[in-house]
Image (cartoon, rainbow, N blue to C red):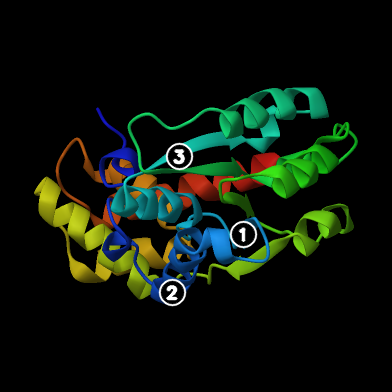
């Protein structure tokens, strides 16, 4: 069973709901990279707003290759230099250009960071390709160097109607029966996180091909129990 989040990943910027202005700004940065004063863009916003998928959608439109590094998996400068540095040196054989995507730089924060932020800052200066950094909250003092070297682009919180639009399209494609009010309730519960909403929809409706009020209430009860157990 393919996760809906993979199956319905955006193929173009037209598929990114509710972020027209920012995807346009990001695409402009990538296209005009050689003339930009800064080599990187730091795109930020809460989970599920389309940050990473926008990078892939733009790359797909431009015929660019994406080299993705998840920052939380690299705890020191040596590892980052090895992965990102090598990616920067290799010429792209099958694509007309390349984007270096350093995802979730929030993962570099904390005591585990051993020169990782400084390593990324140095790579930004040397890069001949656009570097895109993503973060949930880039305003930690630790990221001041990265902020100063990057164009900051904010992805806004999605309203529930944008999330509803995404879910409705999936339901129609997957032949999932639904009541619009119940689907809107599911969209509201996601609090702007489209990815979480897609996962919830798949968990609730994929097997029976129907989204019911009962299944939505079960989800609410389950979430409530999980929250209590975390306390």
Which of the two discs, 1 and 3, labels the residue nearer the N terminus? 1
Q: Position of residue 92 (x, y in %)?
A: 43, 32
Q: At numbered mark 1, what does the secondary structure look like: helix, strand or loop?
A: strand
Q: Which residue is pictured at 71% across the width and 47% down the height? A: 124
Q: Mark 2 near mark 1, Cβ–Cβ under 8 Å?
A: no
Q: At numbered mark 3, what does the secondary structure look like: helix, strand or loop?
A: strand
Which of the two discs, 2 and 3, labels the residue nearer the N terminus? 3
Quadrant in which residue 197 is drawn? bottom left
Q: Mark 2 near mark 3, Cβ–Cβ under 8 Å?
A: no
For the C terminus, give its image quadrant: top right
Say few, some or many: other residues with alpha carbon within 10 Å of mark 1 (under 14 / 14 to 19 / 20 or more): many
Q: Mark 1 near mark 3, Cβ–Cβ under 8 Å?
A: no
Residue named by callout 1: 41
Q: Which residue is pictured at 45% across the width and 57% down the height? A: 50
Compared to residue 172, the image places residue 56 above or below, namely above
Mark 2 or 3, closer to the camera: 3
Q: Is residue 217 visible?
A: no
Quadrant in which residue 78 is drawn? top right
Label placed on residue 66: 3
Which of the two discs, 2 and 1, labels the residue nearer the N terminus? 1
Compared to residue 155, the image places residue 40 above or below, namely above
Q: Which residue is pictured at 45% across the width and 52% down the height? A: 55
Residue named by callout 2: 159
Q: At numbered mark 2, what does the secondary structure look like: helix, strand or loop?
A: loop
Would you say 123 lies left or right of 159 here? Answer: right
- In this view, the residue in front, 185 or 118, is 118
């Amino acid at each position: 069973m393919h996760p809906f989040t993979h199956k319905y990943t955006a193929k173009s910027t037209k598929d990114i709901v509710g972020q027209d202005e920012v995807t346009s700004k990001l695409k402009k940065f990538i296209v005009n990279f050689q003339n930009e004063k800064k080599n990187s863009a730091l795109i930020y916003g809460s989970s599920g707003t389309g940050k990473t998928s926008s990078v892939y959608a733009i790359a797909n439109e431009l015929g660019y290759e994406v080299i993705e590094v998840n920052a939380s998996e690299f705890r020191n400068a040596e590892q980052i230099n090895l992965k990102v540095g090598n990616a920067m040196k290799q010429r792209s054989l099958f694509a007309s250009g390349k984007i270096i995507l350093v995802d979730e730089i929030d993962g570099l924060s904390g005591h585990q960071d051993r020169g990782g932020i400084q390593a990324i800052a140095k790579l930004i200066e040397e890069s001949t390709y656009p570097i895109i950094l993503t973060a949930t909250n880039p305003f930690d003092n630790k990221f001041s160097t990265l902020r100063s070297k990057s164009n900051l682009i904010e992805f806004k919180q999605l309203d529930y109607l944008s999330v509803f639009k995404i879910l409705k399209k999936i339901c129609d494609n997957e032949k999932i029966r639904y009541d619009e009010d119940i689907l809107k309730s599911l969209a509201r519960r996601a609090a702007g996180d489209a990815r979480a909403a897609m996962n919830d929809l798949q968990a609730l409706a994929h097997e029976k091909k129907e989204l019911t009020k009962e299944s939505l209430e079960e989800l609410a009860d389950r979430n409530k129990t999980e929250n209590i157990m975390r306390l």
